[in-house]
Image (cartoon, grey):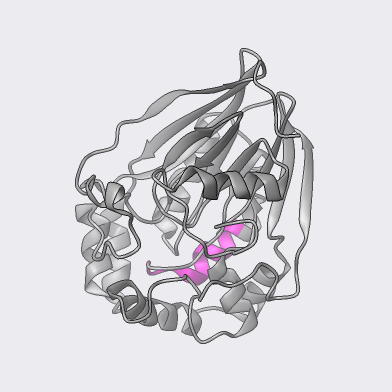
Amino acid sequence: MDKTIGNTGVRACVDLGAIEEPLLICGGAYGNLQALEAFLETAARMGIPVGRIVHTGDAVAYCGDPEATTVLLRDSGVHCIQGNVEESLFAGMPDCGCGFEPGSACDRLSDQWFAFADAHMSAAARQWMGRLPHFLTFTMAGRRVRVLHGGAREINRFYFESTPENDLVEEFGFTGADVIVAGHSGLPFTRQVGACLWHNSGALGMPANDGTPRVWFSLMQPHRGGILFRHLPLAYNHAAAKARMTEGGLPEGYVRAIVTGLWPSLSILPEAERARTGMAIAPRELTVLPLAESPVS
């Protein structure tokens, strides 16, 4: 069942104002402390302060360091929103609320990793999760940007590159945004829809089902009167992340995925995304949203 935004009683939308400098976007840290540490080190090398980093939710999921990853995100100063996992852990729900098909492999596996996360999460970390906003907004190059987790009305709704255009149009209409920056689906993509643009950085904590152990983040910046999105891979100590998962007794399918880059189940993926299983994703820096196009009115 899809869950409507606001089950924790928080519908907050934090406005970051106008941002006219490069910022980094990541999502789905998934309890992967090694990947998050590598990402923050990379951001520092790029000269991007934590005040210009956005995390699109699900700090905790498949990997072996849920508490430490949450604390690092909290203490870093990164702008974070609430994903469905934060919502579930704060509210004491019995499952992750990911929106997996009941009885599917993803659904069965999630019972195991969520139980592990739930057992290794402090009250202080849960309270922080519950205080996170569901949305961020800002403007860049004159465009209205909305950061959300899954969908604007359903926190756990999956949107992919192959999602029917009308579904995306409805989200843009509901939010009034020109650009939606989202997470949840775990795959990096940028798609222009008329004068609007949907961007997903991919997940920081789990490979993108492309047959490599790399994970993904993205750079967003003003460029020639518009906005440039650059999808960037991150190599990190995935062997250490695997060891932590093994120590925690986490599902073997996800333990293997950390190294092989192949998901243990494809049940959430549309046919087009399933067909690209094991195909290495190339870094991309080619999507520009020019101001010449009319924004959503």
Q: Bounds of the magenta span?
A: 63-73
Query: In which quadrant will I find the C terminus?
Result: top right
Q: Residue furthest top?
A: 224
Position of residue 113 measured from the top left corner of the image (x, y, whole percent): 38, 76
Report whether 252 appears left or right of 20. left
Residue 146 located left or right of residue 112: right
Residue at the (69%, 24%) spot, across then down: 294
Q: Residue at x 57, y 53 (%)?
A: 56
Report the side of 207 relative to 211 (left or right).
right
Q: Which residue is drawn at 19% across and 47% down?
A: 278
Left or right relative to 131: residue 189: left
Residues 135 and 30: in front is 135
Where residue 43 sits: x, y (%)? 53, 37
Name which quarter of the figure residue 177 lies in. top right
Check residue 72 for magenta coloring: yes
> Is 270 drawn above or below residue 139 in the view shown?
below
Q: Where is residue 49 in the image (x, y as percent from the top left)?
A: 64, 37
Position of residue 148 relative to residue 233, above or below, is: below
**Dominant secondary-structure state across the stretch colored magenta:** helix
Which quadrant of the structure image shows residue 232? top left
Residue 157 on image: x %, y %: 51, 62
Q: Is residue 30 magenta?
A: no
